Image (cartoon, helix red, strand yellow):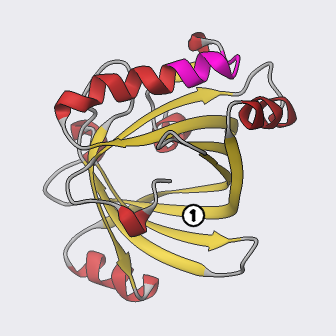
Amino acid sequence: MVNRNNQEDRMLEVEIKAALTGHTKEQLKKAAEKLGFIKGDTLQEIDVYFNGNDRNFMKTDEALRLRSVRDLDAGTCETFITYKGPKLDQASSTRMEFETAVGDLSVMKDLLAALGYKEVFTVDKTRQEWKHTSANVTLCLDSVKGLGDYLELETLAESEDQREAAVETLLQFLRDLGVPKENLTRKSYLELLIRP
């Protein structure tokens, strides 16, 4: 999860995701600390995905979701609405993303329903975030209900020109963590749950 408080308009969310097969979370935590990552929040994120009457976001490779984020350490809860555009390259899950806070989850669901958007799926995960001390990189250790454990590495790029370098930075961290490139997937958790 990219820090929403400092997110600039129209930033590109550059992300890679890998299944944690053959690695334990404890091994990855130790490797992350050696690379300069510091443990952050532990969150429960419940994502409710929607489709409109006018188009199927699964077919257009887009996403519209409401995300409820509960900080398991602080006990706070926030809700966000997010639109993600289609993936922009073959190496990562980079997308144009627009996100804003929502005051009332129930009212927002009703608003989307009134506009013709239907709930299609819910993804429930527990996420442990780690921030790198110098690079603008977030490492996420995710336990996804119905899928298992995954590693995500995320950063922001200000423009298309910076996207390729950002992807390479994330791939280097993946190598340094000892996670094989073969474990990478470009599919979202939603895609993995709907069609493994």
Query: Would residue 48 appear left or right of 148 to someone viewing this image?
Result: left
Q: Residue at x 64, y 81 (%)?
A: 76
Q: Give the labeled residue for mark 1.
A: 46
Foreground of the two, 165 or 134: 134
Main SS, magenta residues: helix
Amino acid type, residue under disc 1 in the picture:
Ile
Of 42 and 22, the residue lying toward us = 42
Report the span colored magenta. Answer: 172-179
Quick one: SS at disc 1?
A: strand
Quadrant where the C terminus lies?
top right
User: Is 68 situated above or below 85?
Assistant: below
The residue positioned farthest toward the left in the image shown:
54
Q: Residue 158's x, y, as percent?
A: 24, 44
**Farthest residue toward the front?**
134
Question: Where residue 112 sits: x, y (%)?
Answer: 28, 75
Residue 91 % position (x, y): 37, 19
Q: What residue appears at the point 48 percent right and 27 percent down from the top-left corner?
A: 170
Identify the residue shown where x is 68% and y is 57%: 40
Q: Is residue 146 above or below residue 82?
A: above
**Side of 54 where 22 appears, left or right:** right
Front residue of 51/186: it is 186
Q: Is residue 121 above or below residue 14?
A: below
Q: Where residue 127 sits: x, y (%)?
A: 66, 53
Seen at 38% across and 81% down, the residue is: 102
In front here: 122 or 125? 125
Is residue 155 visible to us here? yes
In magenta segment, residue 31: no
